[in-house]
């Protein structure tokens, strides 16, 4: 008996000892326990956050780890610790690691979410944030400035993180240089997935900014490599480099409406990056070059269609004796072994030359210093359709040495400026966007060996250039054929960047009181609500805070009569509201609004898509608050009539504006008394698309009778205005529109009957914002 008990106990003890403990570290379940664990931490301590939701997580993580024994703060299960509410984390000390957190459903009450500094006496060095997600953790007010990640100190790292959805003012990631303890940093920003950043409608919306104009002489040594940038569309600069000796290598820019911009930097390395565009946007950008000493090599560009500041390759003019915050002349730059496939005017030289604006801009804004001592060599431009202008010269190119640049322009030679060697290349299409030269292309065998070109040792995919070196980014077909984009190497290993798609539900709404508003409240994003009766009476605003479609069930129009209080909207547009109306007539009482955004806390954009509708008898058709932003306002085959005001899109005097794509096609405007379309952008700034207004095939009659400005369509400061094939009849105004000729404002084939005219003013004087 004793022997049996002994055996059982021995087996039990052996089994118990062989089991690994569930938690190897300090396991904490609340903020107090976490703060105590941080205070007691020593090198090698693992602090483990219990799975679940942590509200108002405001943590100052200070500690002194070592290289081999860092202090780690991590999730019990990566991706199962959710940081919500008003939350942030600040790091101070050395060799700290934060791992596996998911920030969502909230925002930081401070200027940042993750900050590599607690205060001036507690700066983080040799510290790392990894395997973490920040998703939609944006300020309620889009004008409130913050950064999501702030770098200070030296040798800090952000890796394998997913960061997306910032819609308010300020950069997503910012590297600060505020003293000697913050220079020569050697920070690493690597293997991250920078997900979609929506258009902001103003400047200060970079995805990564390294320094500022005051640090243009500062050594940075920041490495931004092996990251994936997906639809980072905040503004014209996806990356803005403003210090020196930084590296941008092996990144992928996938349909980003902006560029990698060497804004105030010198001696940057830009190597082996891939820029993927497409036919669906004219704003996809490439590389913009300012200042001195950059090496731009082995980069690949596909269907980059941006113009001017967003050009596939934009070599800028500088300003003589430039102020710190403006443009230094390009000098001593090398652009070699790059490839452009089906890009629009890929070489643009002297971008920003603005001598024509000398009467409306101060002398300190005139970019008249052309690039000097620069080499553009051994590059390939390949077009499957001819490009009339593969190179655009905005000023003087005499300071640039062009050597061995091969152009295959689909049998359409380009001989102007004598900068290209016209050839017929054999190219293999490997996937939707990747073309590589076939093995036998004699035209690519002759390379120009410029000064120090021997430092370019490999091609885009890492193949050696030591033997059989060739022109262009791709030196060996075999390595290109093996290349595939593996999105799993970017961002956290536990987080999927692929968003699930579901079929929309089709819901039926009768005219019974409250039924439509209740269905809108209960509907899931993407759902369709069919209106089954012929007439609906609505007495309170319908809140739109999701993607929702309202449409008539049959072919006949359904009428919605709004009987709400004066000065209230039928449709109240909230953040993320995406409203589609189809085959519906809406009618007011003359003192309300058809559509209105919230007056404040419009954290995210809204959209309007109105098709085959009638809008009648409102005080305002659309009134947008200064703090709101619409990505798309699209009216098609719609009648808009009998209203005091039309579309009022206001904005602050900061270069901001509050709608990006505004389109009216095949619409009828009748008896709109004033502010038919007032689309406003205040101040002179070049960091954005600048708004797009498109009016085509519309009829405007009896509008503008109380318009004090004498202008029917008001577009002050808007960069892109296209007015074509419209008829203007019996509108009591002096001018239909006053266009800004120096920008992308155009009109053609319009008919005017007792309606004034369209006038073009080449130069307009606006307030300088910097």
Image: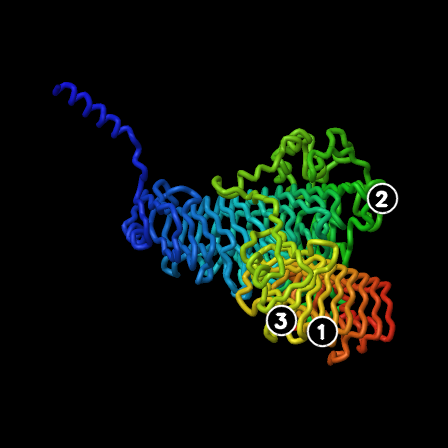
Q: Are marks 1 and 3 in contact (CB under 8 Å)?
A: no
Is tag 2's residue or tag 3's residue first in the polypeptide sequence?
2
Task: Identify the residue at image location x=73%, y=80%.
Answer: 708
Q: Which residue is mark 3?
A: 563
Tell which circle, 2 or 1, labels the residue nearer the N-terminal end. 2
Which image quarter: residue 427? top right
Residue 346 lies, in percent from the top left, at 74, 49
Residue 171 image position (x, y, % from top left): 54, 58
| Mark 2 nearby-residue class (10 Å; few <14, some 14–19, many ≥20) | some
| Residue occupied by mark 1 | 643
Identify the residue position indicated by label 2 in the image. 413
What residue appears at the point 69 percent right and 44 percent down from the top-left corner? 301
What is the spatial separation of the Cα atoms under label 2 and label 3, in whole angstroms? 66 Å
Q: Report the front residue among 518 and 678.
A: 518
Q: CA separation, marks 2 and 1? A: 56 Å
Residue 157: image x %, image y %? 46, 47
Of residues 123 and 661, which is closer to you in this image?
A: 661
Q: Is residue 730 above or below residue 328?
A: below
Mark before the other along the chain sequence, 1 or 3: 3
Residue in the image at 67% along x and 63% along y: 535
Residue in the picture at 86% in, 70% down = 752
Q: Residues within 10 Å of mark 1 (few under 14, many from 20)?
A: many
Mark pair 1, 3: CA separation: 16 Å
């Amino acid at each position: 008996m004793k022997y049996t008990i002994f055996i059982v106990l021995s087996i039990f003890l052996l089994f118990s000892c062989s089991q690994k403990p569930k938690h190897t570290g300090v396991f904490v379940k609340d903020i107090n326990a976490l703060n105590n664990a941080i205070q007691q931490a020593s090198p090698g301590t693992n602090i483990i956050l219990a799975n679940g939701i942590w509200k108002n997580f405001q943590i100052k993580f200070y500690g002194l780890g070592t290289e081999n024994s860092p202090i780690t703060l991590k999730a019990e299960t990566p991706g199962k610790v959710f940081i919500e509410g008003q939350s942030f984390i600040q790091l101070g000390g050395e060799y700290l690691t934060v791992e596996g957190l998911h920030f969502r459903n909230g925002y930081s009450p401070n200027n940042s979410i993750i900050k590599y500094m607690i205060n001036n006496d507690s700066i983080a060095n040799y510290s790392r944030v990894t395997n973490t997600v920040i998703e939609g953790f944006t300020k309620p007010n889009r004008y409130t400035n913050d950064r999501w990640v702030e770098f200070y100190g030296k040798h800090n790292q952000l890796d394998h993180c997913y960061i997306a959805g910032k819609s308010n003012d300020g950069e997503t990631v910012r590297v600060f240089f505020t003293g000697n303890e913050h220079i020569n940093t050697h920070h690493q920003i690597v293997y991250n997935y920078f997900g979609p950043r929506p258009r902001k409608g103003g400047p200060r919306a970079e995805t990564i900014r390294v320094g500022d104009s005051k640090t243009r002489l500062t050594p940075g040594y920041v490495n931004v490599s092996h990251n994936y940038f997906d639809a980072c569309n905040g503004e014209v600069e996806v990356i803005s480099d403003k210090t020196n000796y930084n590296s941008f290598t092996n990144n992928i820019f996938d349909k980003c409406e902006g560029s990698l911009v060497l804004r105030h930097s010198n001696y940057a390395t830009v190597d082996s990056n891939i820029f993927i565009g497409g036919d669906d946007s004219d704003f996809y950008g490439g590389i913009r070059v300012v200042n001195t000493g950059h090496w731009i090599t082995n980069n690949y560009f596909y269907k980059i269609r941006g113009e001017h500041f967003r050009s596939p390759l934009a070599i800028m003019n500088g300003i003589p004796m430039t102020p710190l915050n403006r443009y230094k002349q390009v000098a001593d730059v090398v652009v070699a072994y790059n490839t452009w496939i089906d890009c629009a005017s890929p070489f643009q030289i002297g971008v920003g030359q603005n001598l024509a604006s000398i009467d409306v801009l101060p002398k300190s804004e005139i970019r008249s210093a052309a690039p000097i001592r620069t080499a553009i060599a051994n590059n390939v431009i390949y077009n499957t359709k001819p490009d009339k202008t593969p190179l655009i010269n905005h000023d003087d190119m005499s300071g640039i040495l062009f050597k061995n640049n091969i152009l295959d322009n689909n049998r359409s030679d380009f001989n102007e400026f004598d900068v290209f060697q016209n050839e017929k290349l054999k190219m293999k299409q490997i996937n939707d966007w990747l073309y590589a030269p076939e093995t036998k292309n004699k035209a690519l065998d002759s390379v120009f060996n410029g000064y120090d070109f021997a430092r370019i040792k490999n091609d885009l995919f890492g193949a050696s250039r030591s033997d059989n070196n060739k022109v262009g980014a791709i030196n060996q077909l075999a390595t290109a054929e093996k290349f595939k984009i593996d999105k799993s190497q970017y961002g956290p290993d536990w987080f999927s960047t692929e968003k699930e798609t579901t079929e929309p539900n089709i819901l039926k709404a009768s005219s019974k009181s409250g039924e439509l508003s209740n269905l809108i409240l209960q509907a899931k994003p993407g759902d369709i609500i069919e209106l089954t009766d012929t007439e609906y009476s609505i007495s309170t605003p319908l809140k739109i805070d999701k993607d929702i479609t309202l449409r008539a069930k049959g072919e006949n129009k359904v009428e919605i009569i709004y009987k709400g209080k004066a000065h209230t909207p039928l449709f109240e547009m909230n953040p993320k509201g995406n409203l589609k109306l189809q085959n519906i007539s809406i009618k007011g009482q003359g003192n309300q609004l058809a559509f209105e955004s919230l007056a404040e806390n419009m954290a995210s954009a809204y959209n309007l898509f109105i098709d085959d509708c009638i809008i009648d008898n409102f005080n305002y058709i659309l009134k947008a608050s200064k703090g709101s932003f619409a990505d798309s306002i699209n009216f098609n085959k719609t009648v808009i009539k009998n209203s005091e005001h039309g579309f009022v899109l206001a904005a602050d005097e900061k270069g901001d504006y509050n709608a990006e794509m505004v389109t009216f096609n095949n619409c009828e405007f009748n008896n709109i008394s004033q502010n038919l379309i007032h689309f406003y952008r205040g101040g002179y700034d070049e960091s954005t698309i600048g708004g797009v207004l498109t009016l085509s095939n519309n009829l405007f009659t009896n509008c503008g009778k109380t318009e004090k400005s004498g202008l029917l369509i008001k577009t002050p400061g808007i960069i892109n205005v296209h007015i074509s094939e419209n008829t203007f009849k019996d509108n009591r105004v002096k001018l239909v529109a006053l266009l800004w000729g120096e920008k992308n404002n155009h009109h053609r084939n319009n008919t005017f009957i007792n309606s004034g005219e369209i006038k073009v003013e080449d130069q307009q004087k606006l307030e300088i914002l910097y």
